């Protein structure tokens, strides 16, 4: 019988509930808290953020209904998405391992970020807001929110880390095309931005700084609400649709992965892909989880402690693995992985020993060479961040060859790289 190369679900199989892991964690999640000094950040949040999302952040309900309207938007955005078997890559590596990858690159804007963007825009509209405001690093979140806002009939403003904003011209054009307003961050639009520009008019910016600007923007306009694309519990919960579909797909072929891999910046795609599997691991199933990171921001190797989620300290403190919210990080092409902290849910599970991690060199040669191998065997061009997932999956497959083990390896490709060729070209010298 011919190998099954593509495991598909139909529109009727669309997941109707997100999985909230909070009640199933091995111990309660340390809650966000205020710093000892200054005004209360926690009391500000309901004025700045979507109330339904804040409610979901602290929910003890294991399954959260996906509104029917959002299910429809998921279908329009190409869900469910195929799970592919990487047979050509396996052949090239001559490995006994079986490699499967989830195709989040089948997304209107290019990444998994639309899974939460569509939900957030839907709730924001319902709560009467007229405009969404946000930050973006690699640009994938900004594009996803611009798209979701346009569908919901909302305005959208994006503060984009300058170092990336300046070179990703076409992604910027795409955000404009969706109707969004885009500012390089730090910008002159906020006091946090103006302070930093005074020090350095060409300040490269960071995700932490852009978060501060978005929050300040929402503070100053009651018709605007601040949306976050990663880290927070509700974002990871929305993203579980990726892992829930993947589990159904493995069920269809009567298989279960031994190793589950994705890249990790703030944790939305890693969490979305792995959390349904982590649930099984907490119940005792033997699964290895690996988060692929860059040495530019190896937050999972940092300290497990309370830290701010943004540079200017507008957010509450979150208990997470962090390298420090003021730390300057080397620029990398996979800018989505350049964030100082890891989502609290995943941090707790890492602390309990469920999640392994590897950090690849920040010159990105090693990971991009493996992205090329993937492209030349499987045909799809990954986003630079997803090159890290691929490198890690290949490393594990090579290890299986060394030990002659027929393991099943599942990895997530969270975005396509059609707008990132410059990074590949510069690093690989094309
Ligand atoms: C945002 C993003 C990432 C990393 O961020 P997470 O919060 O860890 O998901 C990785 N890959 C792509 C394509 C992204 O858009």
Image (tube, rainbow, N blue to C red):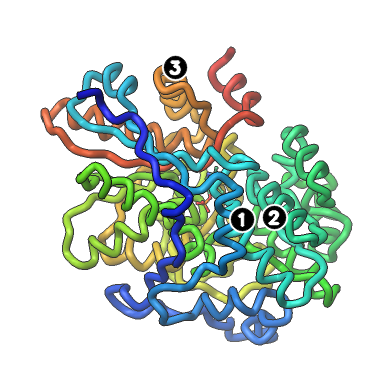
Between 316 and 97, the residue placed more toward the observer is 97
Assign the N terminus to one quadrant of the image.
top left
The x and y percentages for residue 171 are: 73, 37
The mark tally for this picture is 3
Helix, strand, or loop for circle 1?
Answer: helix
Image disc number at residue 376: 3
Is residue 368 visible in the rendered structure shown here? yes
In this image, 417 relative to 248: left or right?
right
- x 27%, y 66%: residue: 352
Seen in the picture, residue 174 relative to 63 is either above or below; the reply is above
In this image, 91 relative to 324: left or right?
left
Seen in the picture, residue 378 relative to 104 is either above or below; the reply is above
Between 409 and 264, the residue placed more toward the observer is 409
Q: Nearer the viewer, mark 3 or mark 2?
A: 2
Residue that lies at the very extreme toward the left in this rendered image: 404
Snapshot quadrant of residue 25: bottom left
Q: Residues within 10 Å of mark 1 (few under 14, many from 20)?
A: some
The x and y percentages for residue 203 are: 77, 47
The x and y percentages for residue 241 are: 45, 57
The x and y percentages for residue 122 are: 67, 66
In contact (CB < 8 Å): disc 2 and disc 1: yes
Seen in the picture, residue 245 relative to 171 is either above or below; the reply is below
The residue tagged 2 is 148
Image disc number at residue 73: 1
Q: CA distance from mark 2 to mark 1?
A: 9 Å
Snapshot quadrant of residue 293: top left
- x 30%, y 55%: residue: 355
Q: Residues within 10 Å of mark 3 (few under 14, many from 20)?
A: few
Q: Nearer the viewer, mark 3 or mark 1?
A: 1
């Amino acid at each position: 019988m011919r190998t099954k190369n593509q495991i598909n679900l139909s529109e009727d199989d669309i997941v109707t509930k997100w999985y909230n892991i909070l009640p199933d964690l091995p111990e309660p999640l340390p809650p966000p808290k205020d710093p000892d000094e200054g005004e209360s950040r926690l009391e500000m949040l309901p004025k700045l953020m979507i109330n339904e999302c804040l409610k979901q952040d602290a929910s003890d309900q294991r399954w959260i209904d996906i509104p029917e309207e959002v299910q429809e938007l998921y279908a329009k955005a190409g869900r469910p998405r195929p799970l592919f078997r990487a047979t050509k890559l396996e052949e090239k590596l001559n490995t006994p391992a079986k490699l499967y990858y989830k195709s989040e690159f089948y997304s209107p804007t290019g990444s998994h970020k639309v899974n939460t963007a569509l939900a957030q825009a839907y709730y924001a509209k319902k709560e009467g807001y007229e405009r969404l405001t946000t930050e973006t690093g690699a640009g994938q979140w900004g594009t996803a929110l611009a798209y979701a806002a346009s569908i919901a009939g909302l305005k959208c403003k994006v503060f984009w880390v300058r170092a990336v904003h300046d070179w990703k011209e076409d992604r910027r054009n795409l955000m404009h095309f969706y109707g969004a307003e885009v500012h390089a961050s730090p910008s002159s639009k906020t006091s946090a931005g103006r302070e930093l520009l005074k020090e350095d008019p060409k300040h490269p910016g960071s995700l932490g700084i852009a978060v501060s600007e978005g929050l300040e923007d929402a503070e100053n306009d009651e018709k605007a609400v601040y949306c976050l694309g990663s880290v927070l519990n509700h974002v990871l919960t929305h993203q579980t649709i990726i892992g829930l579909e993947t589990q159904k797909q493995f069920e269809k072929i009567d298989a279960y992965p031994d190793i589950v891999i994705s890249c990790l910046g703030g944790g939305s795609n890693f969490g979305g892909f792995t959390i349904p599997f982590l649930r099984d691991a907490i119940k005792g199933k033997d699964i290895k989880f690996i988060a692929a990171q860059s040495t530019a921001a190896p937050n999972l190797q940092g300290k497990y402690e309370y830290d701010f989620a943004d540079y200017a300290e507008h957010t509450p403190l979150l208990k997470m693995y962090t390298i420090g919210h003021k730390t300057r990080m080397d620029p990398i092409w996979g800018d989505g992985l350049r964030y100082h902290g890891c989502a609290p849910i995943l941090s707790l599970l890492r602390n309990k020993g469920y999640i392994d991690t590897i950090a690849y060199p920040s010159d990105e040669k090693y990971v991009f060479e493996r992205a090329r191998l993937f492209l030349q065997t499987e045909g799809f061009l990954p986003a630079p961040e997803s090159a890290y997932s691929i490198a890690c999956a290949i490393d594990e497959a090579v290890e299986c060859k060394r030990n002659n083990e027929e393991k099943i390896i599942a990895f997530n490709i969270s975005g396509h790289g059609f707008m990132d060729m410059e990074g590949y070209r510069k690093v690989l010298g094309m």
